[in-house]
Amino acid sequence: RTLFFPLPLASSAELCDLFLSFISLSSREAESFKEQGNAYYIKKDYSEAFNYYTKAIDMCPKNASYYGNRAATLMMLSRHREALEDSQQAVRLDDTFMKGHLREGKCHLSLGNAMAASRCFHRVLELEPDNSQAQQEVKNADSVLEYEKMAELGFEKHDFRMVVFCMDRALESASACHRFKVLKAECLAMLGRYPEAQSVASDILRMDATNGDALYVRGLCLYYEDCIDKAVQFFVQALRMAPDHEKARLACRNAKALKAKKEDGNKAFKDGNYDAAYELYSEALTIDPNNIKTNAKLFCNRGTVGSKLKKIDQAIEDCTKAVKLDETYIKAYLRRAQCYMDKEEYDEAVRDYEKVYQTEKTKEHKHLLKNAQLELKKSKRKDYYKVLGVDKNATEDEIKKAYRKRALMGNKTLNLKEEEKKFKEVGEAFTVLSDPKKKSRYDSGHDLEDDTGNVGDFDANNIFKAFFGGGGGQGYSFEANQSSGPGNFFFQFG
């Protein structure tokens, strides 16, 4: 059997004393934790300071100053949302706690809520009208509000540089505001500063992987860098996190439409359906004027189609638009240079090939540049093919027939001196093009004056006689009949 002995009951006074003793002990222990937290805070060991302030709060959860101290520590750890909760708890416990209101205002401002911050700072000034820190913070809050308004107007006007400037200024006070950072990143993307935009968005996602705005900006950068498949993945993820994200929805739709239209154009081109390809590329160019890189490729593609359709001037115009959008787009320079070559505008072709070779010093680009320079040099000489009126691939017989026709052709619009000059040019052209060695050197761009026999040292009459009559007095001689006027030749037997 177990025996129970009744214990004497404590009086209410004894229980009260016991409770007060416990409270006193808890308060002393909480104060000890607070002091240790203060010591760590001074040493800038904010993680340990946070632990000790938390212990103090656990011992005395109704002490406003403990929440205030922990809020200050959380602010130093850049945990501003948690710091805001502690600051708000502190002023709920003690509405006259000036430091609590000041810290709440700083948290609001860091998070980008300048209106709420301003209310908190004005509450501090009600408690302490000469508080210089609160006075300065009111000015900071007002500045952030002003920069917000300027940024909003700048975005409406597509003045993205102004928006970036305003957000940079605002973030000096609102360093933890994701909204400001996302707006800055979006405008950086619109300005083509993709690495900077990506960096800002990535920083946000490291702290908040579900941030729909940051996911949208990541997708936007990829979209504008012509990585459309990856971009769509980010837009879809942004819509999963924020189903009402209109910008992500529009960008996703544009990305899919642009990809489909471009692929259709590419297929039509490969199938040789150039008219259809031209129309498809033109339609793709209307989808999103802001997508610079993709549009540069579309202009270049349309220029390629234009050259196939013999629309050389239009092809040059499209390639010019491509390089205006993307100055680093080598393919567009090469396409435009080839078009200039086709038009025999060699100065412009050399300029484009020089640009390409400066950017990418490959053997192929060097060869293209040298060829264009050679054609430019050749274009500055007499064009013997044009003098005879034959193609550059003319056969020996075609060259002879052309010479016969030109040599016997008079021109009534020319005076005697001009006619003689023209006759000599025809003879000079025939001398070069009928001689395989000279023709080869001429075609390859060499100066014929470097040959042992100077091309200019010849007698047009001798060539004429040799071609038409042969020697021994059976040839022709060329003379101009001055009495019958220009354009009239007569040929007499020798």
Image (tube, helix red, strand yellow):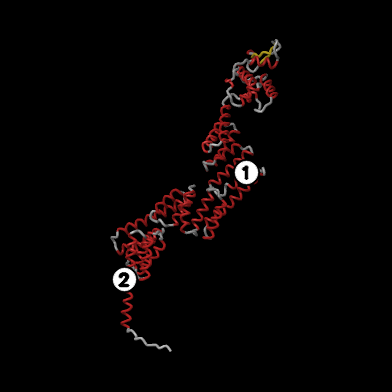
Quadrant for residue 468, please give it: top right
Q: Amino acid at mark 1?
A: Tyr
- The disc at residue 172 is none
* Residue receiving disc 1: 278
Q: Is residue 279 above or below residue 370?
A: below
Q: Nearer the viewer, mark 1 or mark 2?
A: 2
Q: Is residue 364 above or below residue 231?
A: above
Residue 376 seen in the current view: yes
Residue nearer the viewer, 461 or 394: 394
Q: Amino acid at mark 2?
A: Arg
Q: Position of residue 492 (x, y in %)?
A: 69, 12
Residue nearer the viewer, 55 or 208: 55
For mark 1, does the 10 Å Cα neighbourhood hold few (<14), some (14 to 19), or many (20 or more) residues? many
Quadrant for residue 145, please give it: bottom left
Q: Is residue 245 left or right of residue 260?
A: left
**Residue projecting furthest to the front:** 1
Residue nearer the viewer, 46 or 417: 46
Specify the quadrant that holds the N terminus.
Answer: bottom left
Query: Residue at position x 54%, y 58% from top?
Result: 237
Q: How many numbered dots are placed on residues in this image?
A: 2
Q: Position of residue 136 (x, y in %)?
A: 32, 56
- Under tag 2, what secondary structure? helix
Mark 1 or mark 2, which has the lower sequence index? 2
Q: Position of residue 338 (x, y in %)?
A: 59, 35
* Residue receiving disc 2: 28
